[in-house]
Amino acid sequence: MLMKQEKWYVAAKRADFAELGRRFSIDPVVARLIRNRDIEGEEAIDKYLHGTLKDLYPPKQMQGMGEAVEILREKRKEGKKIRIIGDYDIDGIMSAYILKTGLDRLGADADTVIPHRIQDGYGLNHALIEQAYKEGVDTIVTCDNGIAAADQVEEANRLGMTVIITDHHEVPFEEIGEKRIYRIPPAAAVVDPKQPRCQYPFPGICGAVVAMKLMQAMYEAEGIGGDAALEEFLEMAAFATVGDVMELVDENRILVKYGLEKISKTQNPGLRSLLEVCELEHKKLSAYHIGFVLGPCLNATGRLDTARRALELLTCRTREEALPVATDLKHLNETRKEMTRQGVEAAMALIESKGLQSRKVLVLYLPDCHESLAGIIAGRVREAFGKPVFVLTDSEEGVKGSGRSVEAYSMYEEMSKCKDLFSKYGGHKMAAGLSLPREHVLPFMERIEESCRLTPDELTEKVHIDMQMPFGYVNEGLLTQFSLLEPFGNGNRRPLFAQRNVELLGSRILGKNENVGRYTVRDEQNMCYEMISFGDQKELLAYWEEKGKINVTYYPELHTFRGRTEIRFVLQNYS
């Protein structure tokens, strides 16, 4: 099978690393790593290393914030019924929790509705508008959705309801000639940092952070103080930032850094129970734990059941109440993982049988795939081939799908070129969702491929190496300093180094799927080290035995097992 191609690049960014090391009391290697992440200037470096919650941007800088606060304060005083409409993923769940909890504290009459992924679909829809109207709702507040719901907002307006949009997604647009016309919903207030005229300094926040900022502004206006809202909701906003794969730069990095500390000591019975069932109590949490252990348990509810279960977990008042819910969520995620594995196998088999490897954009129609897993499967296939991927599956209304992209391909903009084929679509550069009639599946495959302008170079995965560094340079003191760069994740990647001519001395394959390898290796200085690798070990071993010595990229880490801490090297790529 033709898999993704790689090209290695060693960063060549320049600075006086010795002087930066002296100035900030860090190893010159750490100074180089910071420069490689495009952090320049003493003020920016100091913020990167020592930024605190005081460095977050004021909510009032966000367009529409003032109007939203005044409307909600007035509705609260009048005793009007407010309905929060969220989304079925981590960000939507956390956003809804933040708004509901905050409005409750302020004495507002508020409830929440989380759309069902299959029955309702994404975001604000006409059925939810009708339901709210029949139930006497005066004001609808969206979170993590709504920016693409102009028609639905117009309907709510006709029915005499007030709508406030809080979102973080791209604003829909039409291109007329050389001009791009944005369609912003006619809501009473729209709070979305991606609005064209919004002056908020950092638009890359998630929906839960937008919701938290709104509550900060509300608490400030009510005399409670914005810091109280930050203290109350930081852990949920940080959880959502990682769960929604936001870039861990600027204020996102600060939010997650301090949020992880709060999550590890959380007083929320639901989160504490989730930590317990996932065996993460009393452990130092990283973004990895949110993205790959805790977060998927919340997301699984929206995929295979109803996301209201996840919201229920967060609102539990005791451990006794929360523990059974957390246990159910973990079991549900185990089911989701097995279904995902089967879906990825089906996708790979389809690519092989149809000879799709040479396509620039992979559109895979898997009719029997659970529609809620399409995005995860698309992501796994993208990782394997390094190409944009859409996974389509049958639904009650026709065909639904999700896409996952590569850096050089703006998924939302490319989909906009064939939007006449969709009954509904939305998303952003790296991910998107769509619905279309079954008869449009083949035309979509053809047109999205024809319009693709990706070059072979853009389809070659670029492995960005921070520097060539011998294994022998790594010591415990250096690894301790690496913690200054955390949290690692999207936009703030873990340091990656290269070592040439690594010789294999011994190997041990572990894991029930034989997907973990422990190797004893020797470097060019004839020094021996332990290296670990995850993934297809048979392919790696065959290549190593053929070449004798290989070049590797790696990251070093401190690993503690049975009370003993040692340095180990984790292999990432090889050639």
Image: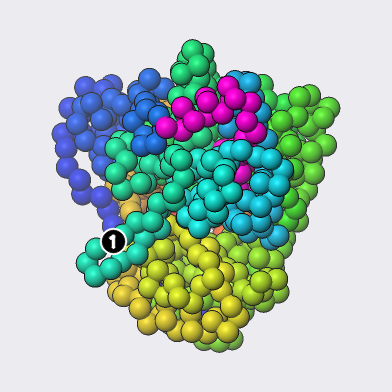
Q: What residue is rendered at 42% in x and 81% in y?
A: 447
Q: Position of residue 509 (x, y in %)?
A: 63, 57
Looking at the rendering, the stretch of residues picked out in magenta corresponds to: 67-95
Secondary structure beneath label 1: strand
Foreground residue, 341 or 423?
423
Q: Position of residue 3 (x, y in %)?
A: 47, 73
- Asked whether residue 362 is drawn in magenta, I would say no
Q: Position of residue 6 (x, y in %)?
A: 37, 66
Instruction: Specify few, some or many for label 1: CA neighbours under 10 Å numbering under 14, 14-19, or 20 or more.
Output: few
- Relative placement, left or right, of 371 versus 497 is right
Q: Quadrant of residue 314?
A: top right
Which image quadrant: the C terminus?
A: bottom left
Q: Quadrant of residue 36?
A: top left
Q: Quadrant of residue 42?
A: top left
Foreground residue, 541 or 321?
321
Colouring scheme, one of rainbow, by chain, secondary structure, one colour? rainbow
Relative to 538, is 452 above or below? Answer: below
Count how many numbered circles sit on residues in the image: 1
Relative to 201, is 450 above or below? Answer: below
Q: Which residue is mark 1?
A: 180
Task: Please say whether residue 566 is visible from this viewpoint.
Answer: no
Task: Please say whether residue 111 is visible from this viewpoint.
Answer: yes
